[in-house]
Image (cartoon, coloured by chain):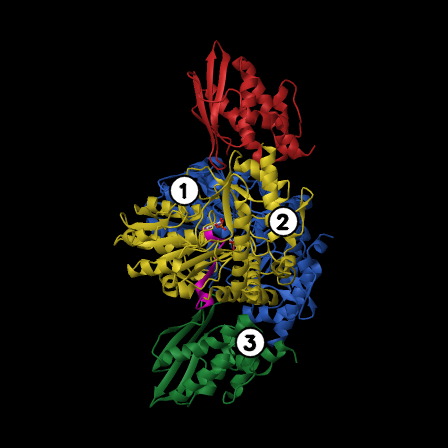
Chain colours: A green, B red, C blue, D yellow
Amino acid sequence: MSDLNKLYKKTVLEHNRNPRNYGVPESWTHHSEGLNAVCGDLVHVYLTISEDCLQAVHYAGESCAISMASASLMTEFSTGMSVETWQKKFKLFKQLMDKNNDLQEIGGLGEINTLSTVKKFPSRIKSATLCWYAMAAAIDGIPNATTEN
Amino acid sequence: MSDLNKLYKKTVLEHNRNPRNYGVPESWTHHSEGLNAVCGDLVHVYLTISEDCLQAVHYAGESCAISMASASLMTEFSTGMSVETWQKKFKLFKQLMDKNNDLQEIGGLGEINTLSTVKKFPSRIKSATLCWYAMAAAIDGIPNATTEN
Amino acid sequence: MLREQFPGLQQTVHGKPLVYLDNAATAQRPQRVLDAIMDYYLHHNANIHRGVHSLSESATALYEQARQSLARLLNAPSDKNLIFVRGCTEGVNLVAQTFVRSRIQAGDEILISHLEHHSNIVPWQILCEQTGAVLKVIPMNDQGELQLDQLDQLLTEKTRFMSVVHVSNALGTINPVKKMIAMAHDKGVPVLVDGAQAMPHLPVDVQDLDCDFYTVSGHKMYGPTGSGVLFGKAEHLEAMPPYHGGGEMISKVTFESTVYNAVPAKFEAGTPHIAGGIGLGAAAEFMMETGMSQIADRDQQLRIYAEQALSEVPGLKMVGTAVEKSPVFSFNIDGIHAHDIGTIIDHCGVAIRTGHHCTMPIFQYFGLAGSCRASLAFYNTEQEVDVLVESLLKAKAMFE
Amino acid sequence: MLREQFPGLQQTVHGKPLVYLDNAATAQRPQRVLDAIMDYYLHHNANIHRGVHSLSESATALYEQARQSLARLLNAPSDKNLIFVRGCTEGVNLVAQTFVRSRIQAGDEILISHLEHHSNIVPWQILCEQTGAVLKVIPMNDQGELQLDQLDQLLTEKTRFMSVVHVSNALGTINPVKKMIAMAHDKGVPVLVDGAQAMPHLPVDVQDLDCDFYTVSGHKMYGPTGSGVLFGKAEHLEAMPPYHGGGEMISKVTFESTVYNAVPAKFEAGTPHIAGGIGLGAAAEFMMETGMSQIADRDQQLRIYAEQALSEVPGLKMVGTAVEKSPVFSFNIDGIHAHDIGTIIDHCGVAIRTGHHCTMPIFQYFGLAGSCRASLAFYNTEQEVDVLVESLLKAKAMFE
Ligand SMILES: Cc1ncc(COP(=O)(O)O)c(C=O)c1O
Ligand SMILES: Cc1ncc(COP(=O)(O)O)c(C=O)c1O
């Protein structure tokens, strides 16, 4: 299977078609807007956190399929997790997406590992990581996030 | 004979060694300073003009051999000439020194023609022409001249 | 065949022949431009303008011949009207910070258009911030054409300068700059034309346009990266303060004072991109030999073919449908984000650009985040347009 | 042999093997730099930073790798400390018009030295004219060394900035910049070091020097023309206003307001000299592989040999006899003007520079119009020094 098909087929297109936890929820406790202005990606993350647990994770926005699918995957993966656990997972995720290594998967990231193919497309990595940075910002009470620098 | 030898041997070195009409004269009616600041060439031209005739032509300054010899040749060539004649000669001289043609000599310029070899050394043309521009400026009552542009 | 003179086109991407449709971002260069660059580095490698040794003399001659070639290409009155710059961006910034800054005050107005590239917006925003001047914008319509019926009233007695793009990099719109310049001049307003996207495609005659300044990017007109030219009218260049300070632009320096060199040296401080200037001269010669009207004709053939072909892709929405257009196509396809299209068709060998193309205000107007942009040059072919269309259909299929 | 990697050296001039001793004006480039330029044009010819297609991705990767190579060469903390510029001249102008202009007022002082190149004088004169600041000069002595005993008192409470040359292009003097920077920092004065002539010859460690800014010219360090790098401390680059406005340096533009991009993009408006940056990266790799201390050692061998050889030419007067010197020799010969020497020895294949070398104040100090300057690089040989000496003797003979 070509890298391209690996990237798009299966999971990404499926989540793009059937996004989980998409849309602005009725209520939330934490929110952040992730914006990569240069490429135009925009994603909002809405969290309901109680007793240090991610009770609900929603997202909204308009971006490319990779960005949308990554957000959809992330919400599914994160819901029900403790904040502490999530932050460990976020560290692992950053390693998975670091283009300076060629890790294809990291234990404990489950389906998220399908995103590692994005490293073959350096200009698209930021699409896949934006929602994670937005979620980390939301947890920290920061209203805006970006992966540009 | 190589271009280099052509350029320096004979006339130029001879005039450089034995400059004619060199030094500030006791009196003059017209004067101009020629300066090519970028390359550091400096030449003063002093004229005594009466009844439209170049009675005396002197020069002073410090520059390279080509510049000094050109001035020496020019003073010898010009002394006694009518201003009007000189201005015609100046036009011919500019044609002789125009690097866009390869005229080696022009009738009526006599020994001045030896300078045409300078065209083979484009960066040195200004050295050879500075004194002529200074003399034209002196005639016109302009105190400064340059060939830079 | 002209196309064969461009070695960058003879390659494969993901195993497919390259279909290079990102010419508005940067062009490919003909072999003779590459040869000119290498000839400098191999046979004339020296600094210019002040050397008495042979290499320096020949390097200087090549550099100044290049300036003459560019003067002929633009029909400038003299090569002394041309300043070598890094590209259009530097050209605009230079004019903003010298000519305009020295004649503008708080409350004065600078007029640009809604079709500008960021490089012809931000330098004026910076100048406005520095001086308290006000930026005004000629509006556009839904076709991506400027609303010129409003120009006359936008040119007020406060307008000090107008800077407009000749051809839009995002939409391909060709603006009637000659008419616009005449209208500005009627009000005594000098004009800079951003020719980044015009020079690669159209005959440009700065004397006929009567523009005060005109600037082009070398890398978009088949020349080297880091090269470009700013044309200015002689009286402006004489009157303007210098830009960078440094070597070459002075004729005499003491710690107390400095005498600037004559134009154009006054604006070319420091060692320039010598190989770039020489390579750009070769590009100009190439364009003149090929013939700018031949290039323009071929562009229009391709534009008509591609317009038709793209209109047959279901769900494709063209952004920018001006009557006068360069072969630049901005579009979106229902249900697929531009970035995804770009990535997918790259795997068919097709190189296009996606995003806002450094023209965010244009896409704000259309309420879009960006577009796919296919931008053609005379060396592209109808078959390549067909490959583009096929690849778009594949992308659609993938998302269905 | 290292020398064989430089194709520009393998040629004849007037039928004689080229003896290239004009390295301070511009260096020759190793084949791998030329290969890197051509590799870009042939195989990665695209614009950088915003493309999703393969060529653009690989061009971007090459350009950013080059930045990393340069960060290693200069030992910068991060590649984000480096801004690509056209050369030293642009580096100095950029710092003057952004960092310094934004923090200076009438009556404040800027300190430079008597050894500066015009490119590190005129930008400050222009800034002084714009702001009413005052230019102060660290004096030099008859050897061409700075009088550092006066530095402390020249650093007053009005001094806002110091900009000094690391190695003099006219005399070869190596300044003790580390010590000078420490003295300036003691008074809270930030420092720019002009490294145009240092980087080709000496190991440079910007963290060890603790300079606030350091700038180099690519074409003098065996890289392409039109390339160069400005190092800045992160906190300065963050705080400084942008320089050029345009594409790449923004993250969001509307007509009302603009959000600038992160450092270093904030300072790199417009399409950069992509091939130049990539070629400069290759030059940095070449220098690191060759070893900067090996290069420095070889330079000093050549310096000692040439100093001795030139001292034997009757009537030759050396200008600049600092203890710490690069292999740069400024001299005059009794009774022969420098330009004549330059022209004559060119016919022996020897390329030197004559004139004031863009350092008029240095020659004003010595009461001279200029000099002959032979400037060597590690690839020169003792035999070439011998040819220089012979050619000087021939010139003398011609004038006797
Ligand atoms: C010491 C010094 N500073 C600055 C410069 C200016 O460098 P560039 O001409 O590459 O901008 C030079 C070049 O001659 C130099 O020798
Ligand atoms: C219309 C227009 N103006 C200006 C520019 C800026 O040119 P450069 O990036 O070469 O400085 C561009 C390049 O994209 C352009 O398309």
Q: CA distance from mark 3 to mark 2?
A: 39 Å
Disc 3 Cβ-to-ligand 2 distance below 8 Å: no
Residue C40, disc: 2
Which range is magenta?
Answer: D76-89
SS for dot 2: helix
Q: Check disc 3 and report its element: helix, strand or loop.
A: helix
Residue in front for this viewpoint, A58 or D323 = D323
Disc 1 vs disc 3: which is toward the camera?
Answer: 1
10 Å crowding of disc 3: few (<14), some (14-19), many (20+)? many
Q: Amino acid at mark 1?
A: Pro
Q: Is residue A76 magenta?
A: no
Are tags 2 and 1 found on a single chain?
no
Give me the residue at 51% from left, 67% from top.
D68
What residue appears at the point 40 percent right and 59 percent down from the top-left corner? D213
Q: Amino acid at mark 2?
A: Tyr
Q: Which residue is mark 1?
A: D361
Q: Can you give x and y, in whole percent of width and height, for residue D296 in the image?
A: 52, 60
Across and down, in percent, residue C307 comes to 63, 58
Left-right relation of C276 to C257: right
As measured in the structure, the alpha-carbon distance from the residue carrying label 1 to the one carrying label 3 is: 55 Å
Q: Residue furthest right?
A: C1
Badge 1 marks a residue whose secondary structure is helix
Three-letter amino acid code at the position of disc 3: Lys
